[in-house]
Each structure stands twice: as C-alpha cells, then as structure tokens.
Image (spheres, rainbow, N blue to C red):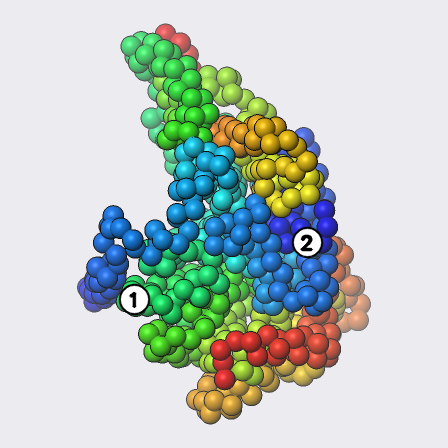
Amino acid sequence: MSVSSFPILLTAIPLSFAALCPIWGMWKKEACFPWSVAGVSATAFISWALVSKFSAVGTIGYKVGGWAPPWGIHIRIDFIGMLLAVVISSAGLLILIYSWRYIVHEVEEAKIPYYYTLYLLIFAAMLGFSITGDLFNLFVFMEIFSITSYALVAVSGEGKALRAAFKYLLMGAVSSITVLFSIAFLYSVIGSLNMLDISKRLPNTPYVVVVNTALALFTAAFAVKAAVFPVHMWLPDAHSIAPSPISAILSALVIKMGVLGIFRVVFTIYGHGFPSTSNLWSSLCGFVSWAAAFSIVIGSSMAIIQRELKVMIAYSSVAHIGYILLGICMLAPRGMTGGIFNIVAHAMGKACFFLVAGSLIYKHNMKRIRELRGIGRTMPVTAGAFAIASLSIVGLPPSAGFMAKWYLLWGCFQKGRYVFVAMVLLGSLLSAIYCFRVVYYMFFTGPRLHTQKVDEVPPSMYVPAALLSLGTLVLGIYSTPLISAINKFVGSLPVK
Amino acid sequence: MKWKKFAVVASLSVLGLLLAYAIGEMPSFGSKNTPDKLHVIPRYLQKSEEEAGAKNIITGVILNYRGYDTEGEVTVIFSALCAVVALLGREKRRLSRSGVDAAGKPTSVIVNTVVRFLVPIILFFAVYVMLHGEDSPGGGFQGGAVVGASIIIFTLAFGLPKSTEKIPLGFRIPLESIAVFAFLSMGFLGMLFGVNFLTFILPGLSHELAHTVRFLMLSFIEVGIGVAGGIIFTSIVFSMIREDEYELQPDLSQS
C-alpha cells in the first residue's frame, strides 16, 4: 500500500475498526477504548501524511474500484476537503481520548462498546463526506453521520436527551430527504453524479428550472445541517443535552459538514458560472449571507441570556456558523479566507469549550454559570484552557479567531457591506460579554482562600482541552502558512 | 396556534407547488434520449456483464461500479442497529418503554404449526434470492429482508426466549458487522494485489481464474449483506420487544 491508496484509507480504516468494535466489546468492554484510539490515530496519521502529499502535488484523486470518474466513484481531495479531513481527524482523536473517562459517567456500561462504535462511524462518515467527489456518495456519508449523531445525542437515555434527539431527528430527516430530492432532480436532467462532471455539463442543459430548483433545495437542506438562523432551532437543545464529548464533536465538526455541503453545491458544482443560473446563484448567496449575519446577532444575543454553560456555548455555535457562512457566501475573496479560516479556529475553540464544560460536570456536576465561582483556583488547567479558548471565540489577538474575524471584516470592506461590518462587530461585542462573564466567575469571584487545594480532573480530560486551547493560540500566531494556502485556494474560486 | 398552523400549511403548499412545477419541467417519465440515458447509462447497459461480472445490470452497478456507495449503505444499516442498541439496549433488559407489544403472547396450535413449516422454506428462499442476485432480480438486501422476516415470524409465534435460544447474542454480534466487514476485506484484498480499493479483477491471475475469483468475491459480499441484513433486522426487533410481556405466561408457547 503506497501513499496513492491513502485517500480511501481515511474512511476504510475507521469503518473497519467500527465493524469490529462490538466484537471486542463482547469479549471485554475495556478493550473498546484502546481499539478505537488505535483506529482514530492511524487515520489521523494518514490524514497528516496526505497533507505532505497535498502540498507537493495539489488535488489528490482516487478512483474507487478503478472506474474512471463519471462511471465509478471518484474521491477527490481538494484544499477544503483536505483541511477538513485534518481538522476532523485531529480534533476527533483528542475528543475521543477525553471521552474515555467522561463517558463512564453518562452512559451505561453495557452500551459503552456501541458508544465507541458510533463514534468511529461518525468519524469515518465525516471524513468520507469531506473527501468525496461524488454527489451521491456525499449523501450516503451524510446519512451515516446524521443517524449516528441522532443516536449519540440520545445515548445517555434521559428523557430530555431523547426529546432533543427527536427534534434533531425531525429536522435532520427533512433535510436529508431534501438533499436526496435535489440529487434526483439534478441526475434526471444531467445524467451524472460526479461533481466535476455535473459542473461541466450544467451550462449546456436546457432544463433550467429543474437545475435551479435543485440548487435552492440543496442550499436550504444543507443550511438545516449547518444550523443557520431560521433553521437553527434543533441545535441549542441537541448540543447542550448531548454528553459533552459528543457536544464537542457536533459543534466543532458536524455542523461544519453542512457548511461544506453548501460550499460543494454553491462553488464546486454550480460555481463555474453560466448565464442561466447565475441570477439565482448570486441572489441565493446574498440570501445565505443575510441569514448568516442574522445568526451572528441572534445567536450571540441568545447566548448572553442563558444561565447554563452548555446552552450558552451551543448558541455561540449558531453565531459562529454565521461568521463562517457570511465569509463564504459574501463572495469577497478576503471574506472567504476569513470564513474558511474560522472553520479551523472555531473547531478548536468550541471543542475546547465543550470539553471544559464537560470537565466541570464530571467533577462537580456544575451546569450553571453562577456555580463556577472560584473554579479557576481549584481547577487551574481546565479554567485556563477555557480562558485562552475564549480569546479565540471572541476574536482577540493573538488568537486564531482574531485572524478569522480580521479577514472577514476585510472582506466586508472589500464589498462595501457596512451593515455586515456592524453586525460582525456587534456579534463580537456580545461574545466578549458572554465569554468573559464565565471567565470572570471562574477567576475573579468566590472564596479567595489560599488553602484551597488544586483538584483537577484526570489528565486524559484536561490535556485534550489544554491542547485545543493552545492550538488556537499557535494557529493565531503562526497563521501565515494556512492563510496563504487558503488565499491560493480562494484565488481558484469564482469570487472577485 | 391557528396562525402557526396556517403558516405551516402555506409554506408547505408553496414548497409543494415549487416541486410540482420543477417536476413538470423534468423530461417526461420513460421518454427516450433524455440526458440521463445518454451519459453514463449506455456503458452500464452494454458492458456491465463483461466489465462488472453480473448479468443483472443493477447488481453490477451497486456492487461494482458504485460499490463504495453500497458499502456506505450497508454502514447506514449497521449504524441504525448501533443506534437502536445504544438507545434501547439488547434484549432481556427492562429499559425500553416501546416496542412490539404483542410479541411473546401465546398463539394457537395452527399458527405454530404453520410457522414451523414456513420458516425453513422462507430461509431457503432467502438463500436463493441472495445467491441469484447476479443474474436475476434479487440480491443481498432483499435476501436479508427475507431472512429477517422469517426470524421475526418465528419470534412472533414462539416468543422471544425461544428465538434467542436458537440465535443467541454471541452468535449474532459477529454476524451483524459481517456486511461492512465483507466489503472492507474484499477491498483490502484488492489493495494487497496492488489495484484500487473494491476492484474485483485481481491482476496476476489468468483470465478464467480472475473471473472466477471475481464471482466468488461478489458472492461473498452478497451473502454477507444478506446475512448481516437479516440478523440486524432481527436484533432491532429483539431490542424493541418488552421483557415483561412474556414473563407473565412462561410456557404457553409450548402447548
């Protein structure tokens, strides 16, 4: 097996580990955790190995089954796919290690093998979704990560969790079936499922209405998965009630899949400009960017009024999906850079937030923000990780979130959209309020006794959180390589 | 509330009209020379038997040309099972509150006898459907549904204890993942021979041998899908049956 076969291993390895995980669980329940760590870290290694190949040769393709693209399924790792694959596999590994001690807390022992199996499945499906070049394959992997995420939200078995998962299931199922409809529409008039092939054949099609309907439906459906403002209702419940590692996975990675879906449809398939759709295309981009701007303001304001830490973090995700989609759909080159950069920055910051919230629940069963008095003294690493990550979520230098917002604002100025500038700044101000309120409670209130002993969670729980928060700092300081790579990629897209 | 209902109906009607309009613009059903029939399909129709190794073109497409998608679909079924088990647990547990309520109730002698006759025949038919997927309608998924149906009929007539005795948990768990495993192992087998994942023509073999090997690989996948599908349906139904239903009347199913 050479490097040329690495793209398929990104899904094949975690899937084979997932298929064998219940069998290990039958033998010994404790064996499931090392088994899944082995699978996920092998996959992470492969994704980093692919990065070095990607930087040498550019877009990597792989023909599954040896069939040439329009006939068989073609895996095509372009820049954004590669970026997401690296983010998913690295963050996925850290969150998996975190969940080892945490999950015993919330999930019954008999179900633990299935927790790890579902984790490996959602991991494989997100990777498959990011790297595929085939529209139907995209749908198949979307189904896998949707089904597994409904189950993972409800895995604790409490009534609240079941209700949240059911709400998520209803919205998610409608969006999945809409994607399937749109694929059927597109296939019936184009006759191909390969994304590049479709985008090549689109300009010549006489069936303009069908193609336009498919575009609108695709965007609406993926917007549900991404939880943009008018269709974000499932997110706060599902993300706050799920077990904390799962909240981290959902908020940091799964909603990015909706963003990637919109990106694939709007740019990879429809983006190469042809007269019959360009009207709808640009007005759709305008619509999505307005929805994104509203989710920034509304998500941030809802986050301010929350009393529970995890609900607050969940609403903050709605706002951040807004930053990402505003950047991508505003069609300004710098804004696009900011949006794509924020995918990485938000993944690290938000995963860290949820892991910290999970540690507080694990140690002291603290769910409300008011209860966090003085936690900074007894749990310094956990609270410190939160403080550093909140710099990135608010968008203060030198963190990664600052670079993302800087480029986003630059893009707004490029296009002269001063309303968006105001909304982004307002969102940042509100996020400063809700993040620093928590930091304030953690460090500056409560008993100032020096006799309090440090009482941390186990290292397997604070190390992933600390690494993620340091990651936001490192990425903010050494942002040049990633920013220039994104700029190069944005140069190849139809944005001016 | 009224206003909400009105808004729902209005938005659904707008969506419905939009979809109806788009469907009206699509090439009419069954018409010749539409774009979808001119691009990729001709190759499937003409070369499937030779290239993909299946007389049944649909089998050729789903197992060979687009085998990776089918691997994903098999994984969807496996994830559904994992989801059910992660929520309800395995059978013989008092966790679930919903399920097949009627299961495990004593049935009449007639039903029991008929089921006893039927189950082997259904299973036999299931094997036929699985193995004949290559050249006639059928295949793994359909065969698996039939296997599942036979076991579920048996469970409905004789109760959960009897069927878990016949197919215990330790036997089902490895078989549940066999479909995903079959796909992946065949894919890795190809990679060991130096071709791409899920390529069924292995290099370095003579023409005849390569075709036989391809037939065996495809059949292994078909049977794997069938067995795993059937067992997964069974396990899902078992998870949903409530335990207290049959505890009240323990041995009546024997009579």
Residue A487: x percent and y percent? 61, 79
Mark 1 or 2 closer to N-term? Answer: 2
Say which residue appears at 51% left-offset and 65% top-offset: A260
Residue type beneath disc 1: Pro
Residue B99: x percent and y percent? 38, 34
* Residue A4 badge: 2
For label 2, the SS is helix
Give the labeled residue for mark 1.
A206
Mark 1 or 2: in front is 1
Where is B52 relative to A287, above or below?
A: above
Q: How crowded is the residue under tag 1: few (<14 C-alpha within 10 Å), some, or many (20+)?
A: few
Where is B207 relative to A355, above or below?
A: above
Where is B8 relative to A323, above or below?
A: above
Quarter of the image where one finds residue B119: top left
The reply, left or right, for residue B248 in relation to residue A469 is left
Residue A120: x percent and y percent? 61, 47
Residue type beneath disc 2: Ser
Residue B226: x percent and y percent? 47, 29
Q: Nearer the viewer, residue A189 or B46?
A: B46
Quarter of the image where one finds residue A389: bottom right
Chain bearing mark 2: A
Say which residue appears at 41% left-offset and 12% top-offset: B251
Chain bearing mark 1: A
Q: How crowded is the residue under tag 2: few (<14 C-alpha within 10 Å), some, or many (20+)?
A: few
